[in-house]
Amino acid sequence: MRETRVQRWSARLVMAGAVVAVLFPLAWVLRVATKTEDGFIREPASLVGEITLANFAAAWSAVDLGGAIRDSLSITIPGALLATVVGTLAGYAFAKLRLPVRRLLMGLAVGGLTIPVAALVVPQFDQALDLGYLDTHIGLIVVYGSFFASWTTLFFYSFFRDLPDDLLEAAAIDGATARQGFRRIALPLAAPAVAVGFVLNLFLQWSELLLGLIMLPSGDVRTAMTAVASFSTQFRTGGPLTAAAAIIVAIPVFLLFIGAQRWLRAEIFGGSIKG
């Protein structure tokens, strides 16, 4: 069935609308970040007026954004790795192994996605205080890895479910154990999906705010997002400095997505394994 001219132009209009919907807020944040303080106070929503880049230097030094970015990297990279490893193993087990309580465990994984973060902060804070991992890198790494493992498990369950059983059965006939089948067959085929899972986990953990505020109360260790949030609390600056700080902390994630485009396109847009 050939695409008509109306359908073609309708698709183009929808795509153009989507592009505008995404780019306009980004352009507005960039414009706010380059406004002077007086210009922002007089006309906060205006896209014209004086332009300055001094806000980026001021935001960088006001809350030690460099230190916050280093802390975020030292927390979110291991946290994303932990969530990806747990999700890969659990997703494969749910999809390919005969587990007596698989439905129960799958229900718990789905339930982990339905629980709002706000419902967990008080018990999580009390537990961290009792066990002594409050205000530490390792504490937030474990919390992030555990919390984001639920969606990662379902992601890899969907991937491994489409993996042809014939490949694993042939390996078993040749004498391979279940562990060897996973390590030598399933895992190499899942390499693009593992890369995507790690990138998405890193993005989600980098952007997370509430758990970072609860688990790092002293401010000696802070994530990039909690540093940005401090502009509207401790420093009360808001406006241009907040926008400038938000752009700065978004740069590492932006560079990560640029570098991971090959895996993102291959897995998310290319589909999964075909039997």
Image (spheres, helix red, strand yellow):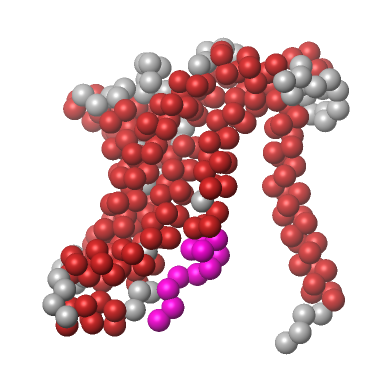
Camera-side residue: 116 or 201?
201
Residue ID at (34%, 27%): 215
Q: Can residue 126 be seen in this view?
A: no
Quarter holding the C terminus is: bottom left
Q: Can residue 265 be seen in this view?
A: yes
Residue 272 percent coordinates (x, y) = 45, 70
Compared to residue 71, the image places residue 78 above or below, namely below
Residue 47 percent coordinates (x, y) = 82, 30
Q: Quadrant of residue 36?
A: top right
Residue ID at (71%, 31%): 30
Count of numbered circles on the image: 0
Residue ID at (26%, 71%): 96
Seen in the image, is 84 located left or right of residue 102?
right
Camera-side residue: 272 or 209?
272
Residue 111 is covered by the magenta coloring: no
Compared to residue 2, the image places residue 179 above or below, namely above
Q: Quadrant of residue 163?
A: bottom left
Quarter holding the N terminus is: bottom right
Residue 272 is covered by the magenta coloring: yes
Most distant residue in the bottom direction: 1
Residue 202 percent coordinates (x, y) = 44, 43
Residue 199 percent coordinates (x, y) = 45, 48
Residue ID at (19%, 27%): 131
Report the span colored magenta.
Answer: 265-275
Q: In which quarter of the image is residue 88?
A: bottom left
Seen in the image, is 93 located left or right of residue 200?
left
Seen in the image, is 134 located left or right of residue 248?
left
Compared to residue 165, the image places residue 39 above or below, namely above
Camera-side residue: 78 or 240?
78
Seen in the image, is 194 located left or right of residue 97?
right
